[in-house]
Amino acid sequence: MTGTLLSISGLTKAYPGVVANDTVSFEIQEGEVHALLGENGAGKSTLVKMIYGLVKPDSGTMAWKGGAFAPSEPRVARATGVAMVFQHFSLFDALSVAENVALGMENPPPMRDLATRIRDVSENYGLPLDPDRTVGDLSAGERQRVEIIRCLLQDPKLLIMDEPTSVLTPQEVEILFKTLNKLKAEGTSILYISHKLEEIRTLCDHATILRLGKNVGTCIPAETTAREMAEMMVGDTLHTPTRTANEGGEVVLEVKNLSLSSSNPFGTRLKDISFEVQAGEILGLGGVAGNGQDELLAALSGEAKTESQAVVVKGKAVGHMGPNERRELGILAAPEERLGHAAAPDMSLTENALLTGAIRQKLIKNNFVNWSETISFAEKIISAFDVRTPGPASAARSLSGGNLQKFVIGREVLQDPEVLVVNQPTWGVDAAAAASIRQSLLDLAANGAALVVISQDLDELMEISDHFGALNEGRLSEIRPAVGLTVDEIGLMMGGAHDLEDAHV
């Protein structure tokens, strides 16, 4: 590290009802990996948007190598040397890798030359990409490579990464870290946002911690435990979820020989999936993104109808039923895509509470919405799940990703489902909120509900699951007790090895 690359001094940004950043100051050195930590709603996203030129600060200053830095738009930030890989990819499925990369460039070269540069840069940094492949055919990890290579073609001096490992397998994380360490060795600075604190300890040189919009401290992650960092983020003692042993109850959910084509042309077909879940049991389903997770949730929630007997709840065939009929029977779901699928972006939290709560909460009477009851339900979710928002009238899109996630999960949990299916329940959520969400799922199971938890976070699944299975190319592995499973066995299951004994030979 040879000097200060970016200096931030007293940055403040307020929105109606909330101060997102309150006189934040810190520095990023040349050639360092600097972590930005904080709970959901702590102000991380607003801060990096100011650095990237998407948001203008109300007050405070930034300096780039000692000179004034106040980007009016992302194009100005990119020209200075700032690149950003967002948590949510901005790619077009029907276009090729090269075409997607070209769309993110100010003056793209001829396509043949660009394809050569993509191959050269991606191989040089250990992230090989075929520029001619259609993005819709790529795995989540490969899609992230497209975003990273698009940034690296700009020769950035500061690379901002927001939750970069949330869609990656452990093996892909190792590859990414090698790439980031290579960039660091070449003098590139990296501002790294993640809720995975052990990754922060492995990768980052320094960390700045935000709480309620303020910088509350810095640390050297390698010399700080994950628990200590989490407690700095929340300003309190971190509580570990506790579970009660599952004695085994009646079979509540049966899935029998379920096969289903995806409604998405780039989706995954489900192939002869069978499993059952008892009352009080949590079945954890792992797998790399894009192996049928969305399709399975759709089949269980009623968004995608199946053969009637393919999905059975308490002896009643429900495969032919739609979502509302299933909700009436107590089958609820929370999909992975929170903004646009789990919640309507421009609707208020009250209206979003109504969307899935109308039936079980009896919020509609004589064809009229009981708005006072609906507002009360939304307020109950906000209070019980510590959703940071000015109130239930706030639009869903105004919430940080983690706070919206807490609202979506809380909305379903508080309806006392018989069966709950959730996909990525703690995606992009800080340590304290993740622990709270996991505890709510454990409590739901303890009260007799049957849960199917789909997640790419293996630590999460091992923490809360009674049984575990893995999805691979639309097929489900053998379901096994979660206790005693090794990382190697889980990796084989995720890779499609259905007979583990044979796989070890």
Image (tube, helix red, strand yellow):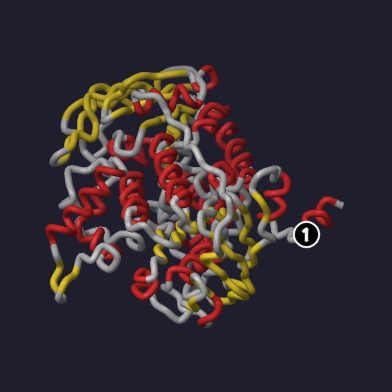
- 308 or 177, which is in the foreground? 308
Q: Which image quadrant for residue 162?
A: top left
Residue 472, percent across and down?
64, 62
Residue 37, percent across and down?
40, 30
Residue at 21%, 38% in the rendered image:
56
Q: Is residue 342 above or below residue 15?
A: below
- 80 or 294, which is in the foreground? 294
Q: Which image quadrant for residue 75?
A: top left
Residue 67 seen in the figure: no
Residue 30, percent across and down?
46, 24
- 314 or 376, which is in the foreground? 314
| Residue 478 left/right relative to 88 | right
Q: Is residue 504 above or below residue 60?
A: below
Which residue sits furthest right?
505
Residue pointed to by mark 1: 499
Give the residue type at disc 1. Answer: Asp
| Residue 177 left/right relative to 443 | right
Residue at 52%, 74% in the rendered image:
315
| Residue 260 left/right relative to 352 | right
Q: Which image quadrant for residue 383?
A: top left
Q: Is residue 297 above or below residue 36?
A: below
| Residue 437 left/right relative to 269 | left
Residue at 17%, 46% in the rendered image:
391
Q: Is residue 396 above or below residue 165?
A: below
Quick one: SS at disc 1? loop
Residue 335 seen in the figure: yes
- 101 or 18, which is in the foreground? 18
Residue at 23%, 66% in the rendered image:
362
Residue 438, percent across and down?
45, 44
